[in-house]
Amino acid sequence: MEPQWQPSNDSPQPPGAPAYGPPAYGPPPYGPPPYGPPAYGAPGYAWSPPPQQSPWGPPPGPHVVWAVLLWGLAVVSLIGVVIAGFIAFVGFYSNSYLDSYGVTTTATVTDLELFTDSVTVEFTTAEGAPATAEFVWVTGTRPAVGEEIQITYDPADPTYATEAGSDSDVAMGVVYVLVTLVALAVAVGAVVGAILVHRRRGKAKRQRAMW
């Protein structure tokens, strides 16, 4: 029987040699690790970060176009808030003004616009002057041409009139209040979204600077 080789306690063991048997000479294994991103850097040295454009680096964050679009949406929504809020205020104010100072009289329908539901009427003011007014009919069935209806007009401007007892201005004000609230919600959401985009871009920039 041939004697088995035993390593000498005096002979140094190279790195990577097995616990028993002859030493495993040769270069260390190369190549990427079996899992995870590739190991950049020279073999045998500490791990070094990948290049800036490497797919294994941190994400660049949202594109700046998103921030521009969100800020633009916020500005447009705020403009809508101002316009819709102003129209709502005018509607409530007009209804209150006619209730307080308006004059109610009988008028004759002279024209109808079926597409817009606009009604044109002619009447005589309290001072005896002829006047013509046009307004949108919002309650019930539209009157026929030649029919007499009750209207309330502004004595300072007889061309501004509405159906007597109608709350059309209030209805308009309520609609535009809802539009104002929606536009305000959109504006707030756009501002919050733009701020989040800027924060994520800043965070991604700091992360990439550390690579």
Image: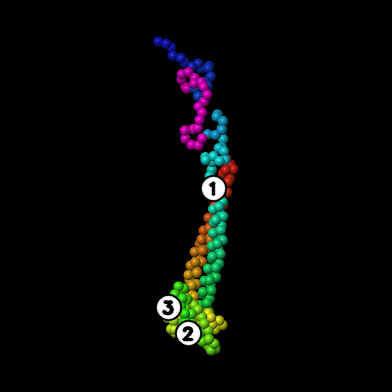
Question: Could you tell me residue 188's position as x and y percent?
Answer: 53, 60
Magenta region, main secondary structure: loop
Q: Quadrant of the N terminus?
A: top left
User: Where the C terminus falls, by quadrant?
Assistant: top right
Q: In this figure, which residue is indicated by the disc labeled 2?
A: 107
Q: Amino acid at mark 1?
A: Gly
> Residue at 47% of width from left, 22% of height from top?
18
Residue 31 drawn in magenta: yes
- How many other residues sit within 10 Å of disc 3, few (<14), some (14-19) or many (≥20)? some
Q: Is residue 211 above or below residue 98?
A: above
Q: For mark 1, what is the residue?
A: 61
Farthest top residue in view: 1
Residue 190 painted magenta: no
Furthest-right residue in view? 209
Single out the residue that lies furthest toward the bottom.
Answer: 128
Res. 34 in view: yes
**Quadrant of the rendered structure where residue 3 is?**
top left
